[in-house]
């Protein structure tokens, strides 16, 4: 027999190729498992081809590692057939491990088929050696190599199946270890099979086939190239899929957040108006289909605005959260609690009869009536509820909401802190309010708003120092309406901002007229609403109006209520400072009715304080009112601010306020609000130091 030796370097190359093929097989299994459609087919066929070529290359490189005294030649046909067998066996293996499960019976069957394929590939490749007298086989070693092939195939299939589903770093490390085990097993099968082959001494290779030296170089380069390309493509695909997965996860999370923001109130996390409308539509469809009932409760907090104004938005927001928690604690069954906005809540509740709605409304009213402890404050609000029942009180969303809202306002008008079921008679008042709201939108366009002027006197009785302009609405059918009939509505709908801008411009226009009539020293003051004061365009609006009507800034005074100024003290200081630096004067209106800090009051760039009429009215009834007014006057004088007292209706009030040191008085005792064309009828009208004050 011919003495055979092995080239150690080539043996190591063959083992490394086996390991590389094994790692490629494990990675391809992962790619096929997470892919679908044409992509899965690509990875199955491409991966099977690469893995088969790798295993085949390992066997041929191992055969080429044999060192004999002659050059070996190989049959091209059998060489190609052996490669085809390896590729087919690899494709089958990938397909098998990517099934949903791999029970023991299927694993054993797969190991039998794949092991037989590997053995067939090996011995077909051995048969490709072109020797004159062929190969002498030692069948014991042949049997051992087949057993190793079967066992190695079973282990390979089990490892590939269990390491296919993850791309985590831990699994990748396990794949490296598994590829080493599989590579050594494949190499063990090969070299055991090589032990089964002996070559007679008188045999010699024919030169009709492919030169073994060139074949070794070709097989090594081609196999490593194919395996490398497939492995790089697979890793790039894995990275892209990981990034795609991260992007998809981020996108899904962003969509969830957007849906939360779009459909839920950001403060209380309750459904907002959009989601409420959808839930209401679903409730109507279900009740109509099942001929059942549900109640729609429109709820409004009584006294919330006072809390919000007195303690600030932060406390108000925490109060709304506390109200939401208490409401949810009372709920059971199928319901939707929503917050359309502000201090309004809406409840959709499935009921069997109206008594169920009444019981729930009573529980909610009693729950909210208990004091809330927010920060260090004990706050009290109440709940007014209007109830509409489907289908008796409405058959569509708009009608139900409108009728529940009408019932809620009926509750408010009858003492608040309770609930009322809708009655058809309530529609008259609701329709009237709705029509008034629609008319208000057209009021400025139709030139229906008016400014009336009330004189302000130097204490005790003159001369006239200025006027306060009070807003009126000359309604085409209802006559002259006072502010309390339409300003709350304007504030609720946001129309107050446009109205406030109109007041600024109209007051400046009127002042310009008086200047042209020969009174260049008169001034005008404008009372700003809370919502208008929060607008970013306020400073620009004031400056534009002054420029348009050629009014010197020092002749305009802006009146801001104490409550408005204290809603956001830092922002109030910033806005008023910006305006006063331009030259405009500032006045703190209704002082004493809000919740203010002396620190912020000192920082506010105001030139005067106005004592609220409520304190002036109390002067004739009790001494506490006199004490408060005295304290306000003393405070203003210490801060070097002028003092204006409004609501003076008796001579006693006039004398008392003058004695305290009030600079300016106004009230019905001295003069009622009148239209601008009648100002000339007032006594002491002509005075070089006169001024005019305009506001709501």
Image: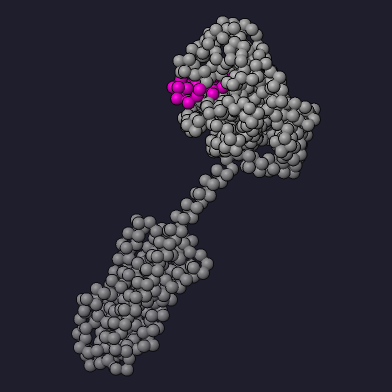
x, y (%) of residue 492?
A: 64, 32
Residue 11 in view, yes or no = yes
Task: Please tell me in which quadrant of the rendered image residue 504 appears.
Answer: top right
Query: Which residue is depicted at the point 29% across and 89% down?
Result: 211
Residue found at the very far front of the displayed protein: 518
Query: Which quadrant would the C terminus be assigned to in this image?
Result: top right
x, y (%) of residue 147?
A: 34, 72
x, y (%) of residue 472?
A: 70, 27
Magenta region:
587-607
- Of 461 and 71, nearer the camera is 461
Query: Which residue is depicted at the point 39% across and 58% down?
Result: 167
Q: Is residue 450 above or below residue 37?
A: above
- Of 306 and 37, nearer the camera is 306
Residue 601 on the magenta segment: yes
77 displayed left or right of 662: left
Task: Please tell me in which quadrant of the rendered image residue 603 appears.
Answer: top left
Residue 322 on the magenta segment: no
- Of 442 and 162, nearer the camera is 442
- Of 580 and 188, nearer the camera is 580
Task: Please tell me in which quadrant of the rendered image residue 19 appears.
Answer: bottom left
Query: Which residue is depicted at the point 55% across and 38% down?
Result: 540
260 displayed left or right of 80: right
Residue 113 in view, yes or no = no
Q: Is residue 2 above or below residue 352?
A: below
314 displayed left or right of 211: right
Query: Which quadrant would the N terminus be assigned to in this image?
Result: bottom left
Please state the total of marks drawn on the protein image: 0
Query: Which residue is depicted at the point 68% across and 43% down?
Result: 282
């Amino acid at each position: 027999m011919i003495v055979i030796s092995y080239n150690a370097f080539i043996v190591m190359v063959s083992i490394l190729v086996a390991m590389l093929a094994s790692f490629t097989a494990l990675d391809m299994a992962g790619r096929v498992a997470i892919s679908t459609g044409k992509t899965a087919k690509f990875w199955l066929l491409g991966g099977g081809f690469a893995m088969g070529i790798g295993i085949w290359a390992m066997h041929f490189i191992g055969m080429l590692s044999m060192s004999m005294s002659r050059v070996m030649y190989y049959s091209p046909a059998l060489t190609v057939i052996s490669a085809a067998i390896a590729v087919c066996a690899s494709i089958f293996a990938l397909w098998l491990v990517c099934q949903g499960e791999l029970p023991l019976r299927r694993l054993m069957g797969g190991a039998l088929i794949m092991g037989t394929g590997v053995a067939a590939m090996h011995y077909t490749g051995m048969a490709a050696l072109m020797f004159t007298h062929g190969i002498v086989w030692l069948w014991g070693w042949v049997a051992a190599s087949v057993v190793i092939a079967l066992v190695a195939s079973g282990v390979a299939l089990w490892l590939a199946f269990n390491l296919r589903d993850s791309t985590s770093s831990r699994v990748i490390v396990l794949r490296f270890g598994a590829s080493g085990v599989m590579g050594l097993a494949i190499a063990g099968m090969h070299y055991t099979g090589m032990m089964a082959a002996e070559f007679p001494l008188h045999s010699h290779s024919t030169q009709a086939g492919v030169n073994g030296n060139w074949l070794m170089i070709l097989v090594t380069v081609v196999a490593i190239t194919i395996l490398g390309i497939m492995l790089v493509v697979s890793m790039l695909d894995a990275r892209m899929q990981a990034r795609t997965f991260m992007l998809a996860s981020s996108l899904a999370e962003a969509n969830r957040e957007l849906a939360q923001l779009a459909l839920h109130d950001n403060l209380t996390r309750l459904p907002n108006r959009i989601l409420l409308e959808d839930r209401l539509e679903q409730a109507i469809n279900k009740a109509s289909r099942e001929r059942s009932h549900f109640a729609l409760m429109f709820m409004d907090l009584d006294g919330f605005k006072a809390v919000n104004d007195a303690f600030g938005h932060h406390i108000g927001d925490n109060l709304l959260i506390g109200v939401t928690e208490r409401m949810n604690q009372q709920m059971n069954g199928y319901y939707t609690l929503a917050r359309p906005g502000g201090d309004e809540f809406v409840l959709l509740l499935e009921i069997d009869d109206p008594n169920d709605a009444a019981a729930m409304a009573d529980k909610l009213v009693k729950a909210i009536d208990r004091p809330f402890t927010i920060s260090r404050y004990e706050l009290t609000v109440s709940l007014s509820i209007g109830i509409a029942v489907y289908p008796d009180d409405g058959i569509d969303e708009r009608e139900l909401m409108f009728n529940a809202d009408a019932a809620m306002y009926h509750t408010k008008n009858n003492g608040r802190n309770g609930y009322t079921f809708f009655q058809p008679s309530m529609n008259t008042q609701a329709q009237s309010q709705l029509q008034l709201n629609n008319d208000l939108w057209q009021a400025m366009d139709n030139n229906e708003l008016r400014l009336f002027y009330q004189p302000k006197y130097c204490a005790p009785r003159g001369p006239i120092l200025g006027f306060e302009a009070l807003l009126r609405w000359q309604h085409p059918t209802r006559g002259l309406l006072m502010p309390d009939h339409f300003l709350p509505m304007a504030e609720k709908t946001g129309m107050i901002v446009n109205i406030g801008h109109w007041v600024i411009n109209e007051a400046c226009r009127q002042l310009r007229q008086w200047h042209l009539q020969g009174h260049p020293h008169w001034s005008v003051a404008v009372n700003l609403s809370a919502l208008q004061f929060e607008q970013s365009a306020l400073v620009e609006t004031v400056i534009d109006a002054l420029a348009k009507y050629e009014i010197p800034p020092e002749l305009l005074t802006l009146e801001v209520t104490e409550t408005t100024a204290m809603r956001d003290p830092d922002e109030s200081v910033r806005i008023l400072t910006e305006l006063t630096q331009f030259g405009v004067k500032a006045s703190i209106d209704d002082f004493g009715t809000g919740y203010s800090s002396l620190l912020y009051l000192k920082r506010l760039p105001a030139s005067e304080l106005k004592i609220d009429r409520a304190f002036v009215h109390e002067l004739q009834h009790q001494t506490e009112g006199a004490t408060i007014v005295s304290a306000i006057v003393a405070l203003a004088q210490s801060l070097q601010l002028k003092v204006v007292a409004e609501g003076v209706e008796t001579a006693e009030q006039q004398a008392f306020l003058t004695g305290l040191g009030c600079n300016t008085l106004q009230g019905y005792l001295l003069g009622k609000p009148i239209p601008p064309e009648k100002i000339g009828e007032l006594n002491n009208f002509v005075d070089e130091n006169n001024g005019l004050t305009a506001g709501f």
